[in-house]
Every structure is written in C-alpha cells, then in structure tokens.
Image: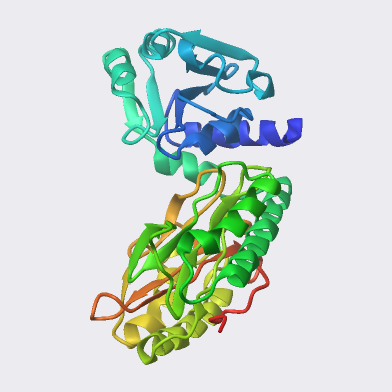
C-alpha cells in the first residue's frame, strides 16, 4: 500500500516524461510470465497473480487498468488505486479504440505485449518503445519508496545469513537455499524471489542435484512486502588463488562506488570507475556491472559502457561485477544494493565487502 500522495507523484512523473518525449499516452504492459509485473503494481497497486494486465496513462485525463476477461479472479482487484478497471475478451480491441490516432509510448513493447493485442492495436495508433522513458520517470525513489527498499534489504540480508548458516561443502544447493526461501516467504515476499547459485561462471537454479563445493557463490534477489526488489549476497567458503585476486578487485570496486555513484556522474563514468580494478587485472565482466532496480527487478539505466544517463540523488542500483577468469570457470559475483546519496554511493546492506570464510 502506498499513500495517495505517492500514487499521484508516480503518475505525475510519468505524465511529465510523456510531455518531454512528445507522447500522448503511456501504455504500461505487465505480465506474470515475464517478470514485468512490477510496472503495473508501481502505477496501480494491483499485483498480477496470473495472466497479464495494462495500465493506460493518458497525458490528460484519468488512467485506466485493463485485463483479459479470464483474469477477473486471478488477482485482488480491490487493491488497485485506479478506479476504471476494464475486463475485455481481447484487450487489444479495447486499447485500439482508446488509443486511436495517438502517439503512444509502450513499456514492454518488445517483451511483454502479447502478439494478439499488438495485432489489434498496431494499425490504430503509433506505438513507440518506451522502456527507457518509463524507467527514467521512476528511477528517482521517494522517501516512501526508500522505506520499502530498506525493508526488502533487511529481509534479503537475513536470508543471506540463513543461507550462510545452512551452507557446507557437500550439501546440495536446495538444502542451503531452503531456510532462506522459508524466511523470505514468512517476511512477506511471496513468490517475488529469484534465488540461485553460480555453477562455474553460470547462473543455475538451486536444485537438489547441485552439490556445493568448498567455495559457493549464491545470487539472492527478493522483493519485500512493498514490492521493491533488492539484491544482496556475498561468496562463501575457501576461494582459490585466482578468485583471491578477483576479491582484491572487488575491494577496489566497493571503495570506488562510494564516490562514483554520485549525482551528476554518468552511468558510463560509474562503470569505468568500478570496473577499473578488474580490467587492470585482465578480467572480463559477464552479465552487467549494475542496473537500476525498483518494482521491476531490472530497470534502466544500466551501469555500463557508453550509457550516458546522468545519475541523480535517490536513484537505486544493484551492483554486481561478474568477474570471469580466462579459463571461463573461475569467477566472483557478489551483489549489493546502492543508493545514490548527495555525495556518493551508499551501500544499504551493512555487510562488508568480503568472502565469508
């Protein structure tokens, strides 16, 4: 639940971005099938339990939320802050009628908009991919949002310690993760958890057949009761000499981020600063150095090469340089959620940057 003032702030930010980009309306697509459900929750308060939904925000006028008719009983529709709720046999027909002749920014155009609805809409209006525009409109978090973020961080840290206590060489990944997952559900995350281990340099679901060795890299990502995702983890066990060298670079990244993640710097500047220790040692980085995070697990901007987006105070980033050795197997990947403070980056977990031995 968010305050009415916070709900209005979010809509106002989206409308300001529409005006900036010369758009008549925003169509925000959410789908339980793709991980885009958080965008719908962000604007409406409705959490998709099954199927998919749309939030339609015109530049002027009241927003609306639309569902396929079979979604009437697969979510708590009374939680929506948006008064107009539409159930359509084919939502694309409803959207085509509402958007006819307009210039529309679509969040989720490439990944979340179902083909059957796209076919109904495409001839009625001009659709523009608007993932970046929408994400930048919600990238600066309010104090109300940050309370939700901090609660998610507390839960994630408790889960990390539960994993750490359950981990031992020879145990399975499922055995080590089970206490953390139980804690996450008890603390109100529901199914908004994405918890894995790295096997070599690759991410893997924590299965019973995965036997953990003397060194373990968990990847823990959760959203607490407020719906804000965070990512916090540290490696465990005994690293080899190659990974020890990577850990030296991690120490340098952690210190560099405290000044690099500052208002006025660009995402490119931050990437160069935090990745320098890895590049100097000859390591390549897999995955991404970091990314904005909120009610969708991965938001824009990324912290990466050539991303010139300017950082602003109260932006939130998950940072996790994925260092990979030349042999393609030795790696180090540890997650931290950072807040862009007035003078630099603030790590929110309180955990030291170290391998827990």
- Where residue 103 appears, as percent x and y from the top left, is 37, 23
The image quadrant of residue 45 is top right
Residue 266, placed above or below residue 31: below
The image quadrant of residue 262 is bottom right
Left-right relation of 53 to 45: left
**Which colouring convention does the figure follow?**
rainbow
Camera-side residue of 26 and 350 = 350
Q: Quadrant of the N terminus?
A: top right
Camera-side residue of 296 and 21 = 296
Left-right relation of 263 to 328: right
Residue 356, placed above or below residue 17: below
- Where residue 336 appears, as percent x and y from the top left, is 55, 67
- Residue drawn at x 49%, y 51% is 194
- Residue drawn at x 33%, y 63% is 306
Camera-side residue of 323 and 174 = 174
- Where residue 11 appears, as percent x and y from the top left, is 61, 31
């Amino acid at each position: 639940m968010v305050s009415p003032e916070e709900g209005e702030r979010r809509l106002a930010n989206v409308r300001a971005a529409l005006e900036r980009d010369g758009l008549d309306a925003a169509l925000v697509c959410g789908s339980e099938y793709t991980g885009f459900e958080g965008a719908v929750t962000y604007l409406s308060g409705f959490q998709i339990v099954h199927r998919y939904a749309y939030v339609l925000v015109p530049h002027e006028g009241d927003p609306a939320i639309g569902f396929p008719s079979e979604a009437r009983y697969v979510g708590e529709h009374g939680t929506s802050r948006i008064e107009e709720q539409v159930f359509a046999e084919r939502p694309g027909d409803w959207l085509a009628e509402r958007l006819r002749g307009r210039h529309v920014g679509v969040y989720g155009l490439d990944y979340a908009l179902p083909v059957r609805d796209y076919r109904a809409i495409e001839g009625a209006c001009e659709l523009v991919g608007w993932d970046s525009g929408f994400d930048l409109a919600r990238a600066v978090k309010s104090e109300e949002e940050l309370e939700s973020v901090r609660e998610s961080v507390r839960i994630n840290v408790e889960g990390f310690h539960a994993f750490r206590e359950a981990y031992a060489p020879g145990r399975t990944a499922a055995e080590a993760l089970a206490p953390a997952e139980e804690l996450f559900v008890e603390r109100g995350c529901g199914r908004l958890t994405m918890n894995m281990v790295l096997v070599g340099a690759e991410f893997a679901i924590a299965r019973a057949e995965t036997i953990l060795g003397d060194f373990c890299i968990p990847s823990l990502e959760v959203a607490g009761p407020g719906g804000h995702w965070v990512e916090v983890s540290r490696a465990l066990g005994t690293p080899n000499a190659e990974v020890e060298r990577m850990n030296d670079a991690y120490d340098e990244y952690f210190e560099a981020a405290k000044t690099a993640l500052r208002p006025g710097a660009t995402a490119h500047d931050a990437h160069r600063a935090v990745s320098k220790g890895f590049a100097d040692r000859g390591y390549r980085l897999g995955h991404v150095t970091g990314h904005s995070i909120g009610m969708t697990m991965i938001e824009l901007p990324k912290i990466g090469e050539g991303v010139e987006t300017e950082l602003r105070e109260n932006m939130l980033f998950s940072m996790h340089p994925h260092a990979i050795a030349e042999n393609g197997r030795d790696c180090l990947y540890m997650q931290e959620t950072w807040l862009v403070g007035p003078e630099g980056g603030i790590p929110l977990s309180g955990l030291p940057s170290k391998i827990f031995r």
